[in-house]
Amino acid sequence: MTISPPEELSGWQTWGAEEPFEDMAGPFFFRKTADGYVSAFKVERKHLNGGGAMHGGMLMTFADYSLFTIAYDELQNGGVTIALNGEFTAAGPASGIIYASGEVVRETGSMVFVRGVITPDDPNADTVLLNFSGIVRKLKKRD
């Protein structure tokens, strides 16, 4: 099943394979930029809490997805999250596009250390909704 991005994210891509949880939670999209990989999703009602703001669990789910897009080049055989930390710094909006960007801090033979930020409406926005960091264990190439 191929999921098409919303008009605002035309040209962005998914992993290319069915991702049942991510597709249900998001769907999420990513693209490569001059500064690295950026992830995004369009806010829908299902992403909100009872107070009408972005649900914190949604932002953490998106942060987990974004670990893998930020470290896309380092994870050619895939990986699994072994740590994810986050600090909420602002309430998320009830509409618009949410972005995540960041950097690989360190790569070892078996792990990739990543940090990033989630922002509303622009990957370079001044408002940060969530600071996050995590460690992804690389999967070994299958024969």
Image (cartoon, rainbow, N blue to C red):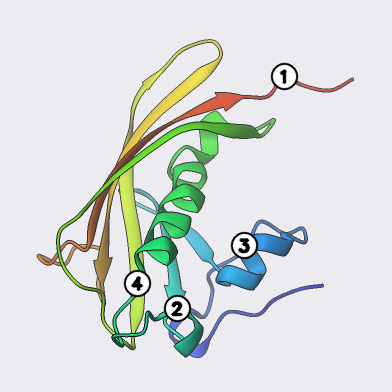
Q: Which residue is mark 2?
A: 47
- Frontmost of labels 2 and 3 is 2
- Between the C-alphas of marks 2 and 4, the distance is 11 Å
Query: Which residue is at a point 43% across and 85% down the rendered structure image?
Result: 8
What number is the disc on residue 105? none
Which residue in the structure is indicated by mark 3?
A: 22
Give the residue pinned by disc 4: 98
Does residue 76 sit above or below 86 in this rendering? above
Q: Position of residue 87 (x, y in %)?
A: 22, 49
Q: Are marks 3 and 4 in contact (CB under 8 Å)?
A: no
Q: Where is residue 19? Give x, y as percent.
A: 72, 59
Question: Along the polypeptide, which appears first: circle 2 or circle 3?
Answer: 3
Which amino acid lies under the numbered mark 4 shown in the image of this protein?
A: Ile
Distance between the alpha carbons at the discs numbered 1 and 3: 23 Å
Q: Separation of disc 3 and disc 4 at Cα?
A: 15 Å
Q: Earlier in the sequence, mark 1 or mark 4?
A: 4
Q: Position of residue 100 (x, y in %)?
A: 34, 58
Three-letter code for the amino acid on which mark 3 is drawn: Glu
Question: How many residues crowd around disc 1 within 10 Å: few (fewer than 14), some, or many (20 or more)?
Answer: few
Look at label 2 and name its amino acid: His
Q: Quadrant of residue 13?
A: bottom right
Q: Looking at the rendered structure, which numbered label has been put on residue 140? A: 1
Q: Give the number of the mark in front: 1 or 3.
A: 3
Amino acid type for the residue under numbered disc 1: Lys
